[in-house]
Image: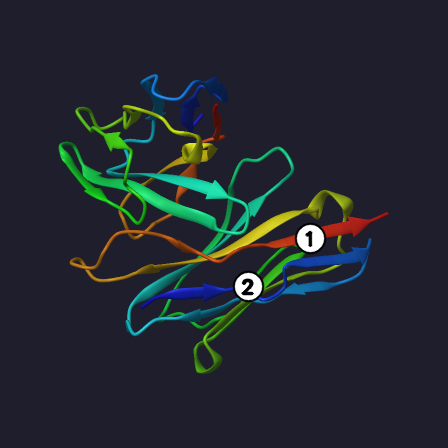
Amino acid sequence: EAQVTQNPRYLITVTGKKLTVTCSQNMNHEYMSWYRQDPGLGLRQIYYSMNVEVTDKGDVPEGYKVSRKEKRNFPLILESPSPNQTSLYFCASSLSRLGVGGYTFGSGTRLTVV
Amino acid sequence: AQKVTQAQTEISVVEKEDVTLDCVYETRDTTYYLFWYKQPPSGELVFLIRRNSFDEQNEISGRYSWNFQKSTSSFNFTITASQVVDSAVYFCALTRGGYSSASKIIFGSGTRLSIRP
């Protein structure tokens, strides 16, 4: 089944403890992206990647890192999480950055930083 | 600058009623793409439709239909004979075309649709 898989679905962590949210797609998509969803603010882009080893900042990249060493994986790294990073996170992929066939989203990761 | 406005924050209708979700967008690009996504209570984002700026044909898929009008910069979504399972938050979104354009999806703030039995 074609899908984007995010792990974990839920995570509660403490301030400053490094964490990684994994994202993997099995559709051979070139484009991948991370978003966070917050009440009243909608979805905002954190980082995106046009292909392997090609990443760039979105609208709200502060406090996050990404890497794209393989086409299928695009992990989101929080080196020192803070409470303002408590949010619902989505990973998305698409055949191209223009969303041919639509962007496919993962099921989301609900992160709470205490 | 690009912007997507969904002025209806919440809509509540009785089952079997028709309902239209409004989406107005702003862009200076001549090539762009518009999307609708559904977010049911379970939280995932489900792709519904993608439309490019050169294709103003309306589209119908079962009970869903979309009306794209460049003259009013609108891309409205209508559900005919609504059902309880249609209850969700619906997002309209926009991306820029052109190879050198910044690569991000700009989402509207969403419309929460509740269908009452």
Compared with B56, A102 (above or below) is above
Mark number, residue B98: none
Please report the residue visible at 29 percent of the width from the left and 25 percent of the height from the top: A77
Q: Amino acid at mark 1?
A: Leu
Please report the residue visible at 22 percent of the width from the left and 39 percent of the height from the top: A49
Q: Do discs 2 and 1 share a chain? A: yes
Please report the residue visible at 69 percent of the width from the left and 47 percent of the height from the top: B86
Do labels 2 and 1 touch, CB within 8 Å? Answer: no
Distance from disc 2 to disc 1, alpha carbons, whole Å, reads 12 Å
Mark number, residue B113: 1
* The one of B104 and B20 positioned closer to us in this rendering: B104
Q: Which residue is mark 2?
A: B6
For the question of whether residue B11 can be seen, the reply is: yes
Residue furthest to the bottom? B71
Q: Amino acid at mark 2?
A: Gln
The chain that hosts pointer 2 is: B
Q: How is the image coloured?
A: rainbow
- Crowding around mark 2 (Cα neighbors within 10 Å: few <14, some 14 to 19, many 20+) is many
Residue furthest to the right? B117
Image coordinates for residue B2, horizontal then vertical, percent: 35, 66
Image coordinates for residue A75, horizontal then vertical, percent: 29, 25
| Helix, strand or loop status at disc 1 | strand
Of callouts 2 and 1, the N-terminal one = 2
Compared with B73, A63 (above or below) is above
